[in-house]
Image (cartoon, rainbow, N blue to C red):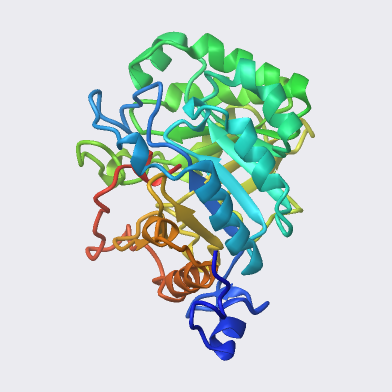
Amino acid sequence: MRSPLESGLSAESIAMTFSPLPLIDSFGRVHNNLRISVTDRCNIRCTYCMPESVQFLPRHDLLSFEEIERVVRVAATLGIDKIRLTGGEPLVRRELPGLVARIAAIPGIKDVGLTTNGILLPELAQPLKAAGLRRINVSLDTMDPVRFRELTRRDGWEQVIEGIHAARRAGFDPIKINAIALKGVTEADLLPLARFARENALELRFIEYMPLDVADAWDRSKVLLAEEILERLRQGIGPLTPAADQDPRAPAVDYDYVDGRGRVGVIASVSRPFCGSCNRIRLTADGKLRNCLFALDETDLRALLRQNEPNDAEIARAIRDSVAGKWEGHEINSSRFIKPERLMHAIGG
């Protein structure tokens, strides 16, 4: 591999590319969080995420572990220190603990997390922990196996529950549960999920339904709003108080139960957009860098990675340019909103 100097870049250009200056956009937001989709494949078919029949990417289009590692190494020189692996369902990617170990060993990376549907977690929780995974989020929308089958169009509720317990045995703490809130669909699941989380020392997070659905059926009237969720929890479980140790750049706003038995968060992308504090960029499974979940434009890092002689300085510059061009926000609540062409499973959760 040629060095930046051998690639014909000036010393000034190299200094700017690899300088310790943070990844900052034109609105002053500093970015330190990279979410990486390792596959667009999934072993369930959630109705709000994927069609029943889907054409997945050819395997040669997916970034290899070596390519992913290279992107993270370059990103770490630019101030990225938090990585989250997503999908699709990341655990269907073979030898995933090996990728975790590679990323966790990169200088500058302080935290590696993963979001999973949990079905394969019973077998993989311990290997992932041993590889260096620090945080884990499990997607679970219901405590009812029948409704689970309706929402996911697959069986597997029992495996998810066992996966959560396996993660606890492996030593993950905290374990976060992500639940999509759909009006007219999941209201009955709010309290059972909250009780399960409290009984098992889990952090539950409800996510407002976002316009990344399969059939373009999203409508604001179908969103179970954050305040509605919180009020149901107050009435059915008990009083809540804002958490004292909030992370101002995290997507969730956290609340503690006044009785001291747990924490719940809400990710209110629709009713309380948090674009103003966003610190995240995303890499799709096929190597496209997105500076927003709802971005309409992408930067092709795979093309740079697969040049005859890949150049880290070019990759770094592409990352900087993508962040610099980030828009102010997604505009879900305005007539200007345009839904991205990719579905959620193809972007990365």
Give x and y (percent) for residue 112: 66, 45
Q: Is residue 192 above or below residue 75?
A: above
Q: Quadrant of the N terminus?
A: bottom right
- Visible residue check, residue 335: yes
Tally of marks: 0
Give x and y (percent) for residue 273: 45, 58
- Visible residue check, residue 242: no
Q: Is residue 344 above or below residue 297?
A: above
Give x and y (percent) for residue 349: 45, 42
Q: Residue at x 47, y 80 (%)?
A: 26
Q: In this view of the protein, which residue sits in the foreground, 137 or 201?
A: 137
Q: In this view of the protein, which residue sits in the foreground, 302 or 175?
A: 302
Q: Residue at x 38, y 30 (%)?
A: 41
Q: Residue at x 55, y 19 (%)?
A: 120
Q: Is residue 213 above or below residue 35?
A: above
Horizontal side of 150 relative to 163 (left or right) equals left
Give x and y (percent) for residue 18: 62, 76
Horizontal side of 39 relative to 4 (left or right) equals left
Horizontal side of 44 relative to 25 (left or right) equals left
* Image quadrant assignment for residue 193: top right
